[in-house]
Amino acid sequence: DSWIALNAIAKEQGSTLAEKVINAQKGFEGGWAFIVSDGKTIVASRDPHGIRPLSVAVLGEKDAPKGYLLSVESCVFNNMGVSDFREVLPGETITIDESGVKTLDMSPKRQMSCLFEFVYMMRPDSKFLGETVYNSRREAGRQLWREAPVELGEGEDLVVMPVPNSGRPSAIGYFHEAQEALGLRVTYDEGLLSNAYFGRNFIKSAGQRKANLKFYPILELLKDKVVALVDDSIVRGDTTSTLVEMLMLAGVKKVHNRVASPPIKHPCYLGVAMPTYEELLANRIPDIREREKYLGASSLRHISLNGLI
């Protein structure tokens, strides 16, 4: 899609790169954060709904800038001497040249930014819509407990455990809320280690997604435990089912899956490599009790859409 957009911009009417970008993107649909240059000027734009993130920062002092930075992840600004940054607004097109930053076009529509940026895509130390992503994920975990606590049997204690790494902030929030309700019957531990070199699992094809190569259980932490396994999302479900099986083989007594996003029932066509309808677990198996059986879990619960919002 980037190649198609580039060709459309190159063929568009306009005496400058900025004019070409502005005119071309009037015919585009979807989500984008463009950063393009002809070697003289940088042009950046965000789609009219603000679906994807994009920020511009001042390098050095705001009144005497040394330069400017653009990124879809604001976390990169943290260690670079940035004094100030802001989000490029939905539908805004800016230029950066020797004279500084200028807004050349504003074509906003109703803002509909992507919730999956908060759930999974962005780094937790970035900011989006004025909110630190880590804080939103942790709060989602707290809300998840309020909506879907684990009911313990007599004599049972609960270990809250994240699916690393993206499930960690929500698991911490879930643990804190659970601890307020159950006190010392709840502990937090990380019984799964993640292979940092395996990459993002959900965008891989079926033959490449191998949870037993991405995750390793710490057996001493798992035997005879009741585990609340907290993840950011379930897409196809094959990774989750493998993790449940892995935990049960390691001696876990019960695995309660808790998910800090609603069931994903539809593919995304606006910039995320989502699978087809047929591959999505929540679409393929609509009944949550049947999904529990498929995953091998003692229970499966998601945060509600309103709860996440």
Image (cartoon, rainbow, N blue to C red):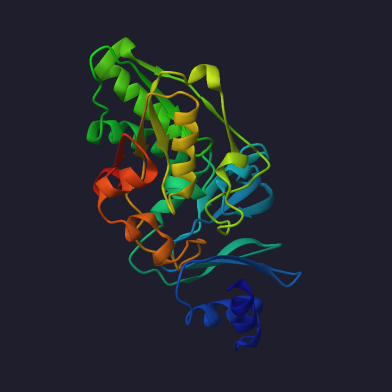
Q: Is residue 94 left or right of residue 131?
A: right
Looking at the picture, how far across and down is residue 64, in whole percent?
A: 66, 47
Looking at the picture, how far across and down is residue 291, in whole percent?
A: 32, 48
Which residue is outermost to the right? Answer: 39
How many numbered dots are placed on residues in this image? Answer: 0
Looking at the picture, how far across and down is residue 257, in whole percent?
A: 36, 36
The image shows residue 8, relative to residue 89, as above or below, that is: below
Q: Is residue 253 left or right of residue 7?
A: left
Q: In the image, what residue occupies the spot 50% across and 61% down?
A: 272
Q: Is residue 71 left or right of residue 106?
A: right
- Of the pair 290 and 308, the residue shown nearer to us: 290
Q: In the image, what residue occupies the spot 44% across and 36% down?
A: 244
Q: Quadrant of residue 102?
A: bottom right
Q: In the image, what residue occupies the spot 54% across and 36% down?
A: 165
Looking at the picture, how far across and down is residue 188, in whole percent?
A: 43, 20
- Of the pair 203 and 76, the residue shown nearer to us: 203
Instruction: Look at the image and tell me in which quarter the N terminus lies.
Output: bottom right
Q: In the image, what residue occupies the spot 41% across and 46% down?
A: 233
- Asked whether the viewer can see residue 301, the reply is yes
Q: Quadrant of residue 83?
A: top right
Q: Quadrant of residue 114?
A: bottom left
The image shows residue 254, relative to residue 211, as above or below, that is: above
The image shows residue 152, relative to residue 105, as above or below, that is: above
- Asked whether the viewer can see residue 49, the reply is no
